[in-house]
Image: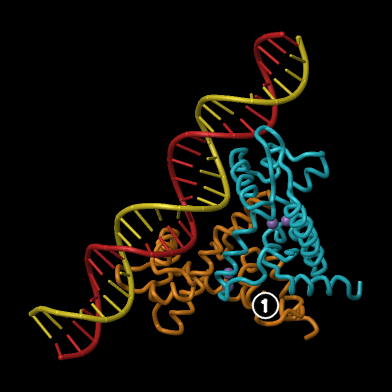
Chain colours: A cyan, B orange, C yellow, D red
DNA sequence: GGCGCTATATAGCACTTGCTATACTTTCGA
DNA sequence: TCGAAAGTATAGCAAGTGCTATATAGCGCC
């Protein structure tokens, strides 16, 4: 069922909610990147993931292990990394959301490079309701 | 000199920058809350901090230890927690920024309760440039 | 003044996400 | 084909942020 978001509906407390968002932020960025690499290069290698995330290769391997544990990706030793259906769906949502946030910030007058920097963190804390509000602004009076 | 922000000027890479923002997010929320409690109750007790942050008391104690290590707060055993000058300045900046982000989201049409939830995470990733853009929107055509 | 309640500190554990160093596997060119 | 280079895995460490259980200190009241 869940084309539902990774928890739009969790903690009552705003601090707990922000912590929860942070906990999935890394997963979101990884699946988005793996999707990008698969599209660009035909496969996502650990070395390429590590390079683009600006982390060491063992760190990437460890984070990929978490993706696998959470059912978002698969991999076999010394082979590339592949998204599950769930992972691919998440990647698409995350990519769209990222683009929306960047476009929205630019529309607000933020320079593109700064919009890109800020969006990388902001995106993980934007609820569906807020995202829709951003889209409404973008679609209204071009 | 530094009424400068906790690093507006760090990593070249957007992922590294978001990680950095995350690393200071907890500090920012704690100093803001300690400032709030001091203003409201005259002092900030560990138990009150823990309750409002929705963490256990030992977790709050440990995070306060980090605040002290980083020169943002002081405390003596079995006494309350006090912000240093630097901590107080940070608290004020963080509080203003929080309010700006919430007000901006509400202006974008986000319901107040959701704006409050999202802002708690978003605020830590909003650069000075983006914050100014938000303020410009708020000050323009009321 | 001492007792008990409450607040705080401390100990010990788990998980996440970083790192370096090193071992192992695969791949590719000579 | 085989050996070096490149890619990946593993080991071991550190720091941060959670938790529960328990010890200890402070405080108010009898
Ligand atoms: Mn991101
Ligand atoms: Mn992104
Ligand atoms: Mn916050
Ligand atoms: Mn806040």
- Please tell me in which quadrant of the rendered image residue A93 appears: bottom right
Asked if residue B127 can be seen in this view, the reply is: no
In the rendered view of the protein, which quadrant contains the N terminus of chain A?
bottom right
Q: Indicate the position of residue A130 as horizontal and vertical percent values.
A: 74, 73
In this picture, residue B9 sits left or right of residue A97: left
In this picture, residue D19 sits left or right of residue D4: left
- Please tell me in which quadrant of the rendered image residue C8 appears: bottom left
Q: Indicate the position of residue B93 as horizontal and vertical percent values.
A: 57, 72
- Please tell me in which quadrant of the rendered image residue B45 appears: bottom left
Asked if residue A130 can be seen in this view, the reply is: yes
Residue D3 sits above or below residue D21 on the image: above
| Residue at image point 71% right, 51% down | A31
In the rendered view of the protein, which quadrant contains the C terminus of chain A?
bottom right
Please tell me in which quarter of the rendered image ligand 2 is found. Answer: bottom right
Question: Which is more toward the observer, D20 or D15?
Answer: D20
| Residue at image point 75% right, 75% down | B136
Chain at tag 1: B
In this picture, residue B78 sits left or right of residue D30: right
User: Element type at marker 1?
Assistant: helix
| Residue that mark 1 sits on | B114
Q: Indicate the position of residue B13 as horizontal and vertical percent values.
A: 68, 49
Decide if ligand 4 comes within 8 Å of the CB at mark 1: no
Question: Which is more toward the observer, D4 or A43?
Answer: A43
In this picture, residue A10 sits left or right of residue D14: right
Question: Which is more toward the observer, B52 or B65?
Answer: B52
Residue A107 sits above or below residue C22 on the image: below
């Amino acid at each position: 069922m869940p084309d539902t978001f990774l928890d739009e509906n969790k903690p009552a407390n705003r601090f707990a909610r922000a912590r929860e968002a942070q906990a999935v932020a890394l997963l979101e960025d990884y699946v988005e990147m793996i999707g990008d690499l698969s599209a660009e290069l035909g496969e996502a290698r650990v070395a390429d993931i590590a390079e683009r995330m600006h982390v060491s290769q063992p760190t990437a391997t460890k984070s990929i292990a978490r993706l696998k544990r959470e059912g978002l990706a698969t991999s076999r030793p010394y082979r590339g990394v592949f998204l599950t259906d769930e992972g691919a769906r998440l990647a698409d949502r995350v990519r769209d959301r990222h683009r929306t946030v960047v476009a929205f910030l630019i529309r607000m007058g933020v320079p593109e490079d700064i919009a890109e920097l800020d969006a990388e963190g902001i995106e993980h804390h934007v609820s569906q309701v807020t995202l829709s509000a951003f889209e409404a602004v973008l679609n209204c009076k071009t």
